[in-house]
Image (cartoon, rainbow, N blue to C red):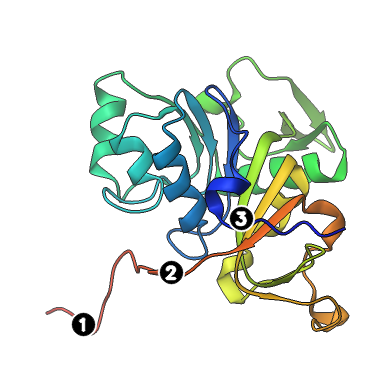
Amino acid sequence: MNKTMSHADEAIRDIQDGATLMLGGFGLCGIPEASIAALVRKGVKNLTCISNNAGVDDFGLGLLLKTRQIKKMISSYVGENAEFERQLLQGELEVDLVPQGTLATRIQMAGMGIPAFFTPAGVGTEIAAGKEIREFNGKQYLMELALSADFALIKAWKGDRYGNLVFRKTTRNFSTSMARAGKITIAEVEQLVEPGELDPDQVHVPGIYIHRIFQADSYEKRIERRTVQLTK
């Protein structure tokens, strides 16, 4: 029952070249900073990364892009990363851009054990190429497959040794679904507490989905675009 790891390097020890990873957070909010840094140190390559975004040039998944450790990105938003753009245009990086709602639902369905679902998003566009389309009530829908991963790396505000997790605000976007969709889910937390200290009514992800948990030393919590006043 005690799933505690001493540090990030121990938690990601068995992630090997070619692994498929889910990385939680929304933009730079709530991303697993410590786990990403450990992956850079480990030097694993040819990774397929599933994430809402691709980080920025010197932070988040941008660090793994900089060291050429990512082979393929499956994302919904990649607009803040110049290195991502360069690798894409040069044909150095495989990219699967997915509508954000579709991406979130594909992950959610994997966690629920549902293999596929139908959505109107993407019908009549390049996204529909090679996919099954059915008509329901006079409207066309595209079949999308559930999306799982070898490992899910997520960050929460608090967690206990059993893996029960509490998130704060936007940080739970994608992370709660990814926690359920990874074959092995690794959670890093700002505060690691003893069982019984968390209010059960406040737990967003129960410990049954979490395989490893550790407390990181510090977090930068960077903001992508800091706006302090309106420009004229």
Direction from residue 97 to residue 16 in the image, left or right: right
Closest to the camera, between mark 3 and mark 1, is 3
Q: Quadrant of the N terminus?
A: bottom right
- List x then y, in percent, for residue 231: 15, 78
| Residue at 35% from the left image edge and 69% from the top image edge | 223
Task: Relative to 179, say whether 119 is above or below.
Answer: above
Residue 18 is situated, as x and y percent measured from the top left of the image, at 54, 22
Q: Which residue is mark 1?
A: 230
Task: Label 3, secondary structure: give it.
Answer: strand
Residue shown at 41%/69% (left/top)?
A: 221
Label located before the other in sequence (2 or 1): 2
* Percent x, y of residue 187: 65, 57
Amino acid at pointer 1: Leu
Compared to residue 185, the image places residue 192 above or below, namely below
Seen from the viewer's position, the closer of residues 164 and 113 is 164
Mark 3 and mark 1 lie on one chain; the one further toward the N terminus is 3
Distance in Å between CA atoms under marks 3 and 2: 14 Å
Q: Which residue is mark 3?
A: 154
The residue singled out by tag 2 in the image is: 219
Q: Amino acid at mark 3?
A: Ile
Q: In the structure shown, which secondary structural element does the residue marked by tag 2 occupy?
A: loop
Q: Quadrant of residue 188?
A: bottom right
From this view, report whether residue 195 is shown above or below residue 21.
below
